[in-house]
Image: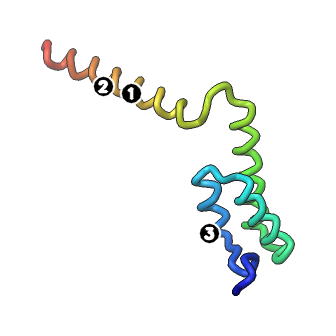
């Protein structure tokens, strides 16, 4: 059986991060950084992930809740504009 570390890729790390599996993404990035210490793209992506994790930890509400609130606000504004156009 293949060693799981042999299958660590930047794409896998991004998939884990996008799915919210931050511990797994960090593990993959740390492995990749050890394997390719000169790859600035990997270092940058890892740094971006750490910033994202810190932002989530210090946020008062989950990131998804913020997006839904913004979406609902836009829907309300759209409805208001649409109702004004109907009246004229």
Identify the residue at image location x=75%, y=81%: 3
Q: Quadrant of residue 87?
A: top left
Residue that mark 2 sits on: 78
Q: How many marks?
A: 3
Identify the residue at image location x=76%, y=40%: 54
86 lies above or below 72 = above
Left or right of 80 on screen, residue 45: right
User: Of all residues shown, which one is farthest toward the front?
Assistant: 1
Q: Residues within 10 Å of mark 2 (few under 14, many from 20)?
A: few
30 lies above or below 54 = below
User: Of all residues shown, which one is farthest toward the top?
Assistant: 87
Judging depth in this view, the residue of 15 and 80 nearest the camera is 15
Left or right of 61 on screen, residue 69: left
Left or right of 11 on screen, residue 5: right
Residue that mark 3 sits on: 11
Cα separation between marks 1 and 3 = 33 Å
Identify the residue at image location x=59%, y=54%: 18
| Disc 2 element | helix
Left or right of 40 on screen, residue 66: left
Q: Quadrant of residue 34?
A: bottom right
| Disc 3 element | helix
Q: Residues within 10 Å of mark 1 (few under 14, many from 20)?
A: few
Residue that mark 1 sits on: 74
Q: Quadrant of the N terminus?
A: bottom right
Say whether disc 1 or disc 3 marks the residue closer to the N-terminus.
Answer: 3
Cα separation between marks 2 and 3 = 37 Å
| Disc 1 element | helix
Say whether disc 2 or disc 3 marks the residue closer to the N-terminus.
Answer: 3
Closest to the camera, between mark 1 and mark 3, is: 3
* x then y, percent, for residue 80: 28, 17
Q: Quadrant of the C terminus?
A: top left
């Amino acid at each position: 059986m293949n060693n799981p570390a042999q299958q660590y890729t930047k794409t896998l790390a991004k998939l884990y991060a996008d799915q919210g599996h931050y511990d797994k993404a960090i593990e993959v990035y740390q492995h990749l950084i050890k394997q390719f210490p000169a790859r600035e793209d990997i270092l940058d992506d890892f740094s971006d992930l750490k910033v994202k994790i810190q932002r989530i930890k210090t946020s008062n509400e989950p990131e998804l809740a913020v997006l839904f609130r913004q979406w609902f606000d836009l829907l309300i504004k759209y409805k208001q504009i649409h109702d004004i156009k109907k009246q004229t």
